Image: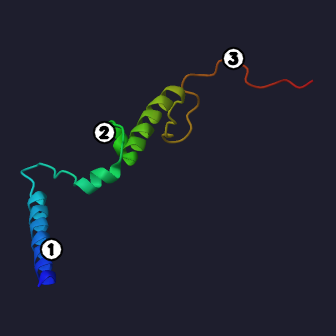
Amino acid sequence: DAAAASAAASAAGRDEARRELEAGDMAGDGDKREAGRQIMKNRGLTRERKKIDRNPRAKNREKYRRAVIKRKGQVRDAKAQEGAYGGESSGINQNVTHSRRFG
């Protein structure tokens, strides 16, 4: 009889826990459901992080975006050639030498 009573009590406890979980899953309009005790306990002591630091993919995408902006300041964009070669548009400066003399 004691075993049957304890089994009934544990079944009632499970039913109550299930109802609480289902009630917790029902969040209001746009509200997020809070993390359970087990999740928060397993998380341990963690420092607060910025929103961007919580998502590595988004952080790396932002880092790449910033790097592209910095690189634009260092290197000119290559222009696509339009039609056949038409000579140097700005002319050739005779006072500038890019080659080296031998001997």
Q: Nearer the viewer, mark 3 or mark 2?
A: 2
Give the residue drawn at x 43%, y 37%.
63
Residue located farthest toward the top when viewing the structure as drawn: 95
Above or below residue 25? Residue 80 is above
Q: Earlier in the sequence, mark 1 or mark 2?
A: 1
Q: Position of residue 21 (x, y in %)?
A: 14, 62
* Residue 50 circle label: none
Describe residue 93's horizontal placement relative to residue 58 as left or right.
right
Give the amino acid at mark 1. Answer: Ser
Give the residue drawn at x 6%, y 51%.
28
- CA gap, disc 1 and disc 2: 42 Å
- CA gap, disc 3 and disc 2: 56 Å
Q: Nearer the viewer, mark 1 or mark 2?
A: 1
| Residue under numbered circle 3 | 94
Dot 1 crowding, Cα within 10 Å, few <14, some 14–19, many 20+: few
Give the residue drawn at x 73%, y 20%.
97
* Residue 51 circle label: 2
